[in-house]
């Protein structure tokens, strides 16, 4: 069974691979050329221009027929505006892409027409050779001073336009027909025609000027526009007078129904006013042709012309709700007849078919009426003129052309009866996208969105068999299929289009079939066998014009057969002369042509051939054969040889190859077994001569001697041995034996010549010959006896038995046939070296033990006859005593079960002779099946009580013998195992430790249940007596706490610790610090790869293997490709790249170990690669391609590709410069590849032993901050740069020496500098005053100042963005590790339901009701039942809503939340309640202003809807959007902390809010602090915290806590006032840094808050975060305390970011602010970089916006993600659509506002403004202000109309003005996608609600909610009862039940009784 299964799998795999190869092969042969281009919109081909034209976005390409580019024209982007509806509108435009919608070739004027989306959908003409623009329709409006542009084509990216150039109203003046699909609702509202006719004549004398519209299509075709047509195809028939234009389109016929009606429309060519417009519905559905709406859409069509008015229309359909597509055909004559039938039914029968009862016609306006004017009576025409019917028409249409429509007859006619097409093909699981038909061959080519091209034979009667080939393109086929330029030398070709390229394809890929059989089997109607080319070719490729098919040179499948020979080619080897070959369909030869016979394998002997035609299909070809000596002998000893024969045409084309068989009878005479028999049984009819001992062909026998020959098949007459008999069937060696044979048909002369010989060959080189004698049988019998003389046989091989054959010959070498020729010789002593073995032999051998008398050890096994005078022992009891030589194992467990193998001699002939076995005085049970005669006994030990030892004894034949060595019973002990977890894929190496492991036999370790079941470890190894290792096996499911057991000989020993199978590690992404999509490293290696995933902690060992491929094969392959393509230039760049990127050559592996950081992150360092070792796949200096493989235990995961770059080179930019502390050191770098192979943090620069931190980095240079010089006199220090594992040593760094005279010289220098500064300040002040007066004259200087400031801000932005990217990548890793700190469901809904309370009592877990309160519980239950009555609930809500004075908005929100809590247990009922409340709310407000519904959120319905969204969108918020919002919050906080933040005013350098922007230039530096906590030991690494020198102590503490407690949610962190920040100042001691110390300014009311720099805290200082004590104690021996503040501050309260001001003292941190009206603020830090221009610092808002843009976009994109729309959103929007449809609301803006106000502005705005409601975080005011700006942007993006900001708009409005249009389109697409998707079913929504309830598993205190809700019922009880007496809105019985229930509830709640109240 296994063999069959393996065979089946192999065949399946072979079939799959073969199928894949065939698909690839089909594409290779069908696609001739390709042209790579993106955003293709249209293709056209022109034979006259010999060109192919491709239109795409912003360009037009002209190619030759093989897709080689000839010219190109760029058409965009251009300055344009969607708001510009006139050429001179004055609206400032921007660069806009031009989507070329239409490209047509005008053959009359030798030009092309191109229409694009620019300038409101304009068209232009271009030269068809140079592509130069000739004229644009926009120019016409400029020339004629038109007030507005008119769209010629639609402009939306997704809309469709089709066009056709037809004959105009005058000769040589073509016109342009354009059919447009409806533009997007957001497209500019300019006029566009669904159908339009435009003049293509530039002269206004003949017709309208170029692109002038001849009719107003918008007014005539308004009904078509309303039905949103999507035009797919346009075609024409006939000439101008009798022809028509046809349009195929999908029309949305019924409002609010998803789906389209498929239609065809027709107009007359001479009808310029569309009076002849008629449309008819089409169908192509095999199941239900009458289904018209929502089922199918037309995707493409093709019209095959046959003459002027004949042809067939082919149309492809896709079915929206089914899993197949169809293609149908329609006869154009039938369609024209139906069009005329439709007109006639309307004009003559009032719309009824044949004036009967079936109505088939309707009009858009009015009804069909019988017209008396539709006759040929001339009087009618005059009557019309007299009645002035035609007075307003410029000309009159004759009555003879009435079928093309008239103004006085009904127009815009619609047929309602469906026209069903003839299905030509149907395909399951396919979406047809385009079609083209070769009408000559009747072959359709259908493309699909699945990337397949189907070839359909329309001649095939059976439709299921019509598809004869499928070409796998690999990409969806889109657009139209276009016929290529015709060429008589090959079959038709066409062009196809994908999203990435244009394909030049052939209709016939015949060359992919290599022989005639596969060619015929392909069923390709184009292909046939080209006989004289020996290829499968199309007819055009095979035959010239002079050749005909009658010459059999092109064989057609189905009509002809392949060339084959018709007779057998079998000849005797000695045959001499010509042979005849009958061949079918052999082509006839012309003069000068010839055939040749070539025999291969015999030196390619050529023989000329002649032909003779026998009949129409058969030809005799004659040629000679080689001589017998030229024919080779058979290599395998067979009696024939096959020689390939080729029939060549003109000595080079192989027409036919066939094998000729030459047989040889003579070779049978040399056979030794049965020569006569084999001769007569051969298939060649050979004969045998006994006398000559010869086999020949009958044709070789002389007729005179034929009687002496035995003929074919007469084998009984052969001389042969009939039977064998001798004294014994077995022949012993060394004992003389006779051989007697019975022989039949022995010739009489056999014994008279050289006699008879009997020959044996027993062993190689041992031949035994004996003379034989014949004893004739009785007279008349043919049987005689042959007696071979006695012979003593022997052989050397140590084998008991040996087979041999007897060769019986007479007359020296003539062999007698011997069929059963097999003799057996045996030797007793061969393998039996003791008595027991000897006596175990089978009795037929008669072996026994021969032993000299008195000997106990010697002897030999022989037969009795050869024992001579020695004693022959034939009974085993007489054998010598047995002996034990060894046993194994030497020890075992005390529980027994060990199989002990005992080895020795003479230990019995059979197991029955072994009577007893003991091991250490304990019985050992014999295992008979493992007994080995005489040498081995196996037994299973028994159980003992304790450890012991003893000898092994065996009793054989009642004699007991013991061993020399001791066997030991031991007790194993298992103490521990490690590791305790591993992946379920297995491969974890377990190490078990204990004692006595080296005992017993079988050992295994099981995982799981123990005692039987479980999984065994693999590769178990006993390392020593105390350690065992093994590898865990693979399991299907992960499972924890599995029992481990050590099993020794079936005894289980439990391992005290449990093992857990964890889920297999999964790799999600691999990153470097560059955070780019490509992994890059230097060849020096050592770069860290951060591998993110899951379940990494279960991995014991992880390694990274980098495989680099060699240069050798790559080089050869490239050369081979170069040779192959020497004469052909590739146009397909994609294929060329794929060839170059293939990893080939000799692979070299480099492996490194990886480190598991945590369960979600693994870090590996790239290994070093040496180019001279790795055999690179490129020359030196080129990037190396490598593959990454991560092995985790036994699991291997492919990580993708890695690129190795050459190591950079470094040098000091200024090597001789003396460096200054805290200055910058410049280092030049070559080949740095910054941001690819290295980042700023990965470059380690060491000056001596101190690190020089890299601060600024460019592509070829970077700067690092020079550290403080170490103490001492040394000035020169080594400079080293390390990246990964590579280190570069540069020129040493020289520090500037300090000035010796510090008190003298330095003081002088300071004085001089101060004086110079004062002088310069005075000078600058004077200059500044003068420049103020000349400000307007010096605008350039001011502009330069602004530019310098902008460059500075940009530099800050770039630096900040780079830093934030790195830090956010670390933050992302932390988020992946710790997760998003989302609040649990209870806390989340509490925050949102009761935002002002935050811990409402009803949101707590319900408490158990005491028994005494049973009446209260009953009342609450009754009240809950009352709320579950919808009749009461709606009356109750409506009553509350009407109390406008006493019932406030706050009360409404409170009641809605209480209702939500009370009904939370049944979300389905709550959902229906919300729907009904929302529906009532809409109905109440429709009459007022429907746009304001949902906007104010001032009703219970509004509040309940909000609560419903809070509940249902919680899973989506938590799983999808939550992470993006959280990352945005973190990014804001991270970036705010990068710049100064005023602790008093809350203003920051980095913010999005203008109100919170710090508009001063505050000087600061970064400080790196090392912080420890009390929990960390001395050996623990301190945390690194980066702060600013301008930070207050409170801000430093906050940053320290953010780093220390980054893995803790905010609620679990200690409060800031519980901790102190302590500065450790080396030997000087420790100092607690107070957070509120201030320093007062002299003679001022201002006090400045101390910063960290005021305490002289240096870079790399050490701080400690510790619990706050009662009193601060500081060291008294702190040095240099001159600037240090007092540590005995009276007030030690923590300072918040917004610090209060006390008494009259004004406190400030960074900026002094007097009051709100004061505009000029003073900075506490001097500005020395720029002039103070506050408004210019608004650029920081742009910087902050740019830094956060990715995160803002990610949030908005995740909210409006079309790929994962939440189910509740679909449900809500569908509900709103239903209400709008019910109330006939057609204004899309109203529906947009409803959806916006009900979801984005209700739910998402609340979340964005209040992220602390969702996450366990702190939201400082600085984050809140930025989130307010982002939230306002979000609200603006959801608006209906874009509000463009002006220069007077608030800064916050202008900040995101550019992005808002993009976000608006995103919102609109989101709404559109929901509308297009299928509506959510109620069952689906109910299932979703059930899942929420199960996942939340949250019970609230419903009784408390009911208790708080009841007072509202009690307060308005009378009003509620009043409304319930009104039967208008509800039926009486419903109201009666609700009323009854209300009264019962009232009594229970108020009086504790359910007695009805009056």
Image: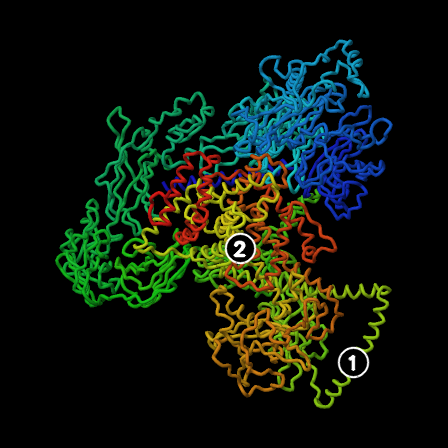
- Displayed quadrant of residue 717: top left
Q: Viewed as shown, does residue 1773 lie left or right of 818? A: right
Q: Which mark is residue 783?
A: none
Would you say 618 lies left or right of 78 here?
Answer: left
- Residue 1528 position in % (x across, y down): 58, 58
Q: Secondary structure under badge 1?
A: helix
Residue 1435 locus on image (x, y percent): 47, 42
* Whether residue 1317 is visible: yes
Q: Nearer the viewer, residue 241 or 1889?
A: 1889
> Counting other residues with Cα less than 10 Å from the Cα at mark 1, is it few (<14), some (14-19), or many (20 or more)?
few
Contact between labelled residues 1 and 2, with CB atoms less than 8 Å apart = no
Which residue is located at x 85 percent, y 36 percent?
144
Residue 552 or residue 1697, whichever sits in front: 1697
Label of residue 1318 in the image: 1
Q: Which residue is mark 2?
A: 1522
Is 761 drawn above or below residue 1306 in the view shown?
above
Whichever of callouts 2 and 1 sits on the residue coming sooner in the sequence is: 1
Please tell me whether residue 1072 is drawn above or below residue 355 in the rendered image.
below
Whole-number angstrom distance, CA of label 2 to CA of label 1: 57 Å
- The colour scheme is rainbow
Can residue 1172 be seen at all in this image of the molecule?
A: no
Image coordinates for residue 235, horizontal then vertical, percent: 70, 26
Rendering quarter of residue 87: top right
Where is residue 532 shown, x and y percent of the image? Answer: 64, 28
- On screen, residue 779 versus residue 1515, left or right, reads left
Q: Residue at x 66, y 66 (%)?
A: 1549
**Which one is nearer the viewer's eye here, 1289 or 1685?**
1685
Label 2: state its secondary structure. helix
- Report the residue at 69% width, 21% height from top: 306
The image quadrant of residue 1747 is: bottom right
Q: Is residue 464 above or below residue 1445?
A: above
């Amino acid at each position: 069974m296994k063999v069959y299964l393996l065979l089946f799998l192999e065949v399946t795999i072979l079939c799959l691979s073969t199928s894949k190869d065939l698909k690839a092969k089909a594409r290779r042969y069908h696609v001739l050329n390709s042209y790579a281009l993106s955003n293709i919109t249209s293709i056209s081909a022109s034979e006259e221009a010999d060109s192919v034209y491709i239109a795409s976005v912003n360009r037009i390409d002209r190619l030759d027929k093989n897709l080689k580019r000839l010219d190109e024209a760029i058409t965009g982007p251009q300055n344009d505006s969607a708001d510009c509806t006139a050429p001179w509108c004055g609206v400032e435009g921007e660069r806009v892409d031009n989507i070329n919608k239409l490209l047509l070739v005008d053959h009359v004027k030798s030009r092309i027409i191109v229409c694009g989306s620019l300038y409101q959908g304009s068209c232009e003409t271009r030269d068809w050779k140079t592509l130069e623009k000739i004229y644009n329709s926009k120019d016409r409006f400029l020339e004629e001073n038109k007030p507005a542009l008119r769209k010629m084509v639609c402009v939306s990216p997704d809309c469709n336009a089709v066009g056709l150039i037809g004959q105009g109203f005058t000769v040589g003046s073509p016109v342009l027909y354009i059919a447009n699909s409806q533009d997007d609702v957001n497209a500019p509202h300019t006029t566009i025609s669904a159908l339009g006719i435009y003049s293509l004549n530039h002269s206004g004398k003949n017709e309208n000027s170029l692109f002038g519209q001849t009719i107003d299509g918008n007014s005539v075709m308004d009904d078509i526009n309303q039905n949103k047509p999507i035009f797919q195809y346009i075609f024409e028939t006939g000439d101008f007078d009798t022809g028509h234009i046809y349009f195929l389109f999908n029309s949305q016929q019924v409002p609010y129904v998803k789906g389209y009606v498929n239609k065809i429309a027709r107009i007359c060519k001479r009808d310029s006013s569309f009076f002849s417009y008629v449309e008819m519905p089409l169908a192509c559905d095999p199941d239900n042709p009458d289904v018209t709406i929502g089922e199918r859409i037309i995707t493409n069509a093709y019209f095959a012309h046959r003459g002027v008015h004949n042809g067939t229309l082919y149309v492809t359909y896709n079915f929206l709700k089914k899993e197949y597509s169809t293609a149908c055909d329609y006869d154009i004559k039938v369609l024209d007849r139906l069009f005329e039938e439709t007109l006639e039914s309307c004009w003559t029968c009032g719309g009824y078919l044949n004036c009967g009862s079936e109505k088939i016609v309707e009009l858009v306006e009015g009804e069909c009426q019988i017209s008396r004017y539709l006759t040929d009576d001339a009087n009618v025409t005059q009557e019309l003129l007299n009645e002035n019917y035609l007075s307003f028409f410029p000309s009159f249409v004759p009555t003879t052309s009435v079928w093309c429509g008239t103004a006085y007859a009904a127009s815009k006619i619609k047929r309602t009866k469906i026209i069903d097409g003839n299905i030509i093909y149907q395909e399951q699981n396919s979406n047809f996208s385009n079609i083209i038909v070769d009408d000559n061959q009747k072959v359709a080519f259908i493309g699909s969105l699945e990337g397949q091209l189907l070839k359909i034979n329309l001649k095939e009667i059976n439709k299921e068999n019509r598809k004869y080939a499928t070409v796998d393109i690999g990409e969806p086929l889109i657009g139209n299929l276009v016929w290529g330029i015709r060429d008589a030398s090959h079959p038709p070709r066409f062009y196809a289009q994908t999203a990435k390229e244009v394909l030049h394809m052939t209709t016939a890929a015949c060359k992919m079939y290599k022989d005639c059989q596969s060619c015929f089997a392909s069923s390709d109607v184009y292909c046939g066998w080209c006989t004289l080319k020996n290829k499968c070719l199309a007819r055009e490729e095979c035959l010239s014009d002079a050749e005909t098919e009658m010459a059999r040179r092109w064989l057609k499948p189905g009509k002809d057969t392949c060339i084959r020979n018709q007779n057998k080619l079998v000849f005797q080897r000695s045959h001499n002369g010509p042979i005849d070959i009958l061949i079918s369909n052999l082509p006839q030869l012309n003069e000068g042509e010839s055939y040749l016979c070539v025999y291969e394998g015999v030196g390619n002997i050529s023989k000329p051939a002649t032909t003779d035609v026998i009949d129409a299909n058969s030809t005799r070809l004659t040629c000679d054969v080689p001589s017998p000596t030229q024919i080779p002998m058979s290599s395998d000893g067979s009696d024939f040889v096959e020689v390939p024969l080729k029939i060549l045409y003109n000595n080079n084309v192989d027409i036919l190859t066939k094998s000729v068989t030459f047989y040889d009878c003579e070779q049978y005479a040399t056979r030794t077994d049965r020569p006569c028999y084999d001769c007569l049984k051969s298939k060649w009819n050979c004969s045998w001569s006994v006398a000559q001992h010869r086999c020949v062909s009958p044709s070789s026998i002389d007729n005179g001697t034929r009687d002496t020959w035995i003929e074919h098949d007469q084998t009984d007459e052969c001389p042969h041995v009939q039977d064998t008999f001798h004294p014994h069937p077995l022949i012993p060696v060394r004992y003389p034996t006779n051989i007697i044979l019975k022989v039949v048909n022995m010739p009489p002369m056999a014994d008279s010549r050289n006699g008879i010989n009997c020959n044996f060959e027993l062993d190689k080189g041992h031949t035994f010959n004996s003379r034989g004698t014949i004893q004739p049988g009785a007279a008349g019998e043919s049987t005689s006896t042959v007696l071979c003389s006695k012979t003593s046989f022997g052989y050397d091989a140590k084998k008991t038995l040996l087979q041999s054959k007897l060769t019986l010959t007479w007359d020296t070498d003539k062999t007698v046939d011997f069929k059963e020729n097999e003799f057996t010789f045996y030797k007793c002593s061969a393998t039996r070296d003791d008595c027991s073995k000897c006596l175990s032999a089978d009795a037929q051998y008669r072996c026994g033990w021969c032993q000299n008398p008195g000997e106990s050890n010697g002897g030999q096994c022989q037969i009795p006859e050869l024992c001579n005078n020695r004693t022959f022992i034939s009974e085993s009891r007489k054998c010598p005593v047995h002996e034990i030589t060894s046993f194994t194992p030497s020890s075992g467990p005390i529980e027994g079960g060990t199989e002990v193998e005992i080895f020795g001699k003479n230990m019995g002939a059979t197991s029955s002779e072994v009577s007893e076995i003991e091991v250490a005085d304990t019985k050992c049970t014999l295992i008979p099946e493992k007994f080995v005669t005489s040498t081995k006994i196996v037994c299973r030990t028994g159980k003992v009580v304790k450890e012991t030892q003893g000898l092994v004894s065996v009793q054989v034949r009642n004699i007991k013998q013991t061993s020399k060595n001791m066997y030991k019973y031991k007790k194993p002990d298992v103490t521990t195992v490690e590791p305790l977890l591993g992946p379920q894929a297995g491969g974890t190496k377990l190490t078990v430790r204990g004692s006595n492991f080296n005992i017993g036999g079988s050992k295994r370790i099981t995982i799981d249940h123990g005692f039987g079941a479980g999984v065994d470890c693999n590769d178990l190894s006993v390392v020593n007596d105390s350690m065992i290792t093994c590898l865990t096996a693979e399991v299907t499911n992960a499972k924890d706490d599995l029992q481990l057991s050590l099993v020794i000989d079936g005894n289980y020993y439990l391992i005290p610790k449990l093992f857990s199978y964890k889920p297999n590690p999964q790799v999600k992404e691999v990153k470097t610090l560059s955070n780019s999509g490509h992994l890059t490293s230097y060849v020096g290696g050592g770069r860290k790869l951060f591998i993110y995933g899951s379940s990494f902690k279960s991995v014991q060992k992880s390694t990274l293997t980098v495989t680099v491929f060699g240069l050798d094969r790559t080089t050869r392959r490239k050369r081979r490709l170069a040779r192959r393509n020497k004469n052909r230039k590739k146009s397909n760049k994609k294929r060329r790249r794929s060839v170059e990127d293939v990893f080939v050559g000799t692979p070299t592996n480099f492996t490194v170990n990886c480190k598991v950081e945590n369960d979600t992150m693994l870090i590996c360092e790239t290994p070093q690669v040496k180019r001279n070792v790795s055999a690179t796949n490129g020359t030196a200096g080129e990037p190396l391609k490598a593959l990454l493989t991560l092995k985790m235990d036994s699991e291997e995961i492919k990580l993708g590709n890695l690129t190795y770059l050459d190591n950079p080179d470094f040098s000091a930019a200024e090597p001789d410069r003396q460096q200054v502390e805290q200055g910058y050191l410049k280092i030049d770098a070559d080949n740095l590849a910054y941001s690819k192979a290295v980042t700023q943090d990965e470059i380690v620069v060491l000056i001596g032993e101190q690190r020089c931190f890299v601060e600024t980095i460019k592509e070829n240079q970077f700067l690092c901050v020079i550290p403080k010089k170490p103490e001492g006199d040394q000035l020169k220090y080594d400079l080293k740069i390390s990246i990964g594992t590579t280190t570069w040593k540069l020129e040493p760094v020289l520090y500037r020496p300090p000035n010796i005279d510090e008190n003298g010289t330095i003081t002088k220098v300071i004085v001089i500098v101060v004086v110079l500064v004062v002088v310069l300040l005075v000078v600058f002040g004077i200059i500044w005053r003068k420049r103020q007066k000349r400000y307007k004259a010096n605008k350039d200087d001011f502009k330069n100042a602004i530019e310098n400031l902008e460059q500075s801000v940009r530099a800050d932005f770039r630096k900040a963005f780079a830093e934030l990217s790195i830090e956010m990548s670390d933050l992302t890793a932390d988020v992946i590790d710790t997760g998003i700190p989302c609040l649990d469901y209870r806390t989340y809904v509490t925050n949102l339901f009761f935002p002002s309370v935050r811990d409402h009592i009803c949101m707590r877990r319900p408490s158990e009701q005491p028994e005494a309160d049973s009446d209260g519980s009953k009342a609450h239950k009754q009240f809950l039942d009352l709320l579950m009555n919808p009749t009461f609930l709606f009356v109750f809500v409506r009553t509350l809503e009407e109390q406008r004075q006493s019932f406030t908005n706050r009360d409404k929100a409170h009641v809605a939340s209480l209702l939500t809590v009370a009904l939370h247990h049944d979300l389905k009922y709550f959902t229906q309640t919300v729907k009904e409340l929302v529906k009532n709310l809409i109905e109440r407000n429709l009459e007022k202003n429907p746009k304001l519904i949902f906007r104010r959120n001032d009703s219970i319905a509004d509040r309940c809807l909000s609560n419903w969204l809070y509940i249902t969108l919680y899973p989506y918020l938590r799983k999808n959007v939550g992470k993006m919002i959280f990352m945005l919050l973190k990014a804001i906080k991270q970036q705010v902390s990068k710049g100064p933040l005023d602790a008093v005013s809350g203003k920051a350098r980095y913010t999005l809010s203008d109100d919170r922007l710090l508009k001063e230039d505050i000087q600061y530096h970064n400080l790196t602090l090392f912080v420890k906590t009390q929990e960390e030991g001395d050996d623990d690494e301190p945390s690194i915290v980066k702060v600013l020198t301008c930070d207050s102590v409170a801000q430093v503490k906050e940053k320290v806590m953010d780093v220390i407690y980054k893995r803790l949610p905010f609620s679990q962190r200690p409060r800031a006032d519980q901790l102190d920040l302590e500065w450790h100042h080396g030997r000087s001691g420790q100092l607690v840094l107070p957070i509120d110390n201030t320093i007062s300014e002299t003679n001022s009311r201002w006090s400045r808050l101390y910063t960290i720099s005021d305490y002289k805290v240096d870079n790399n200082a050490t701080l400690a975060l510790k619990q706050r004590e009662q009193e601060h104690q500081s060291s008294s021996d702190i040095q240099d305390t001159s600037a240090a503040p007092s540590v005995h501050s009276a007030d030690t309260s923590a300072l918040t970011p917004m610090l209060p001001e006390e008494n009259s003292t004004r406190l400030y941190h960074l900026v002094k602010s007097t009051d709100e009206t004061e505009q000029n603020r003073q900075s506490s830090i001097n500005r020395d970089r720029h002039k103070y221009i506050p408004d210019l610092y608004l650029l920081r808002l742009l910087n902050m916006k740019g830094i956060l843009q990715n995160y803002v976009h990610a949030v908005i994109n995740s909210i409006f993600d079309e790929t994962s729309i939440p189910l509740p959103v679909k449900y809500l929007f569908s509900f709103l659509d239903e209400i709008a449809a019910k109330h006939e609301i057609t204004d899309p803006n109203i529906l947009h506002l409803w959806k916006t106000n009900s979801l984005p502005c209700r739910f998402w705005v609340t979340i964005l403004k209040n992220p602390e409601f969702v996450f366990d975080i702190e939201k400082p005011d600085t984050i809140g202000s930025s989130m307010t700006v982002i939230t306002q942007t979000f609200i603006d993006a959801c608006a209906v109309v874009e509000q463009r900001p002006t220069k007077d708009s608030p800064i916050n409005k202008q900040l995101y003005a550019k992005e808002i249009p993009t976000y608006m389109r995103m919102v609109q697409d989101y709404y559109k996608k929901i509308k297009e998707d299928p509506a959510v079913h109620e069952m689906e929504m109910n299932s979703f609600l059930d899942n929420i309830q199960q996942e939340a598993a949250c019970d609230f205190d419903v009784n408390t909610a009911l208790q708080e809700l009841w007072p509202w019922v009690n307060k308005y009880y009378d009003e509620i009862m009043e409304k319930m007496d009104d039967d208008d809105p509800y039926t009486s019985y419903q109201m009666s039940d609700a009323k009854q229930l209300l009264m019962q509830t009232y009594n229970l709640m108020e009086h504790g009784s359910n007695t009805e109240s009056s």
